[in-house]
Image (cartoon, rainbow, N blue to C red):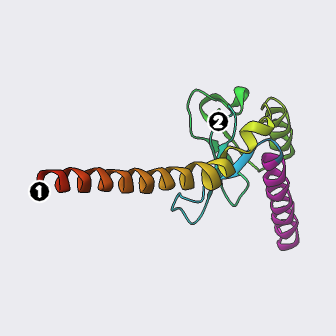
Amino acid sequence: MKQWEWEQEQGRREEETFRRIHLLREAGYVVAWSREVKDALFLDHLASGPDLILYPSGMIVSLGKDAPLHPDGGEDGDRILNRATQDVDAFDQWIRTISKPTWWQRGAPDREKYIYRPGCLLMFVLISVALGQVIQYIYNALMR
């Protein structure tokens, strides 16, 4: 492969990778930043889709063996590559099968971050203060 052909193919792969990122986001995938891997993005689906790994080459791998991405892929059915136009078609066909999350499912991460966690912290503080008051009352009653 000549240099200019290689550069053209590399540009096509990069464009396809970014297109896949946008389509995955629209389908309800979010990046799981808690994973400590530097050369891939772990994507969690907000509804019922399979969790994925997206590599810089554009290859997508399903984390669950029960969720094939490419039914015609044989042993490689858990992945969609980014090497040819058939891979683009396979990705487009697969992404259409993913159910989009509802507005309630899309809001779950924010509800957890801004309502559930602070609410739990507030309840812990209030219960701790109430328990301290009960212990102080019992102590004062016993010391009389």
Query: Which residue is outermost to the front?
Result: 144
Crowd tier of the residue under label 2, counting other residues whose Cα lies within 10 Å: few below 14, some 14–19, many 20 or above: many
Q: Name the residue that disc number 2 marks.
A: 50
122 to 87, vertically: above or below: below
State the residue at coordinates (77%, 50%). 83
Query: Which residue is outermost to the left?
Result: 143
Mark 1 residue element: loop
x and y percent of residue 18 in the render? 82, 59
Q: Is residue 110 visible?
A: yes
Judge by depth and name the residue closer to the eye, 41 or 87: 41
x and y percent of residue 132 in the render? 30, 56
x and y percent of residue 139 in the render? 17, 55
Say whether residue 80 is magenta.
Answer: no
What residue range appears in magenta? 1-25
Q: Name the image quarter holding residue 129.
A: bottom left
State the residue at coordinates (55%, 51%). 119
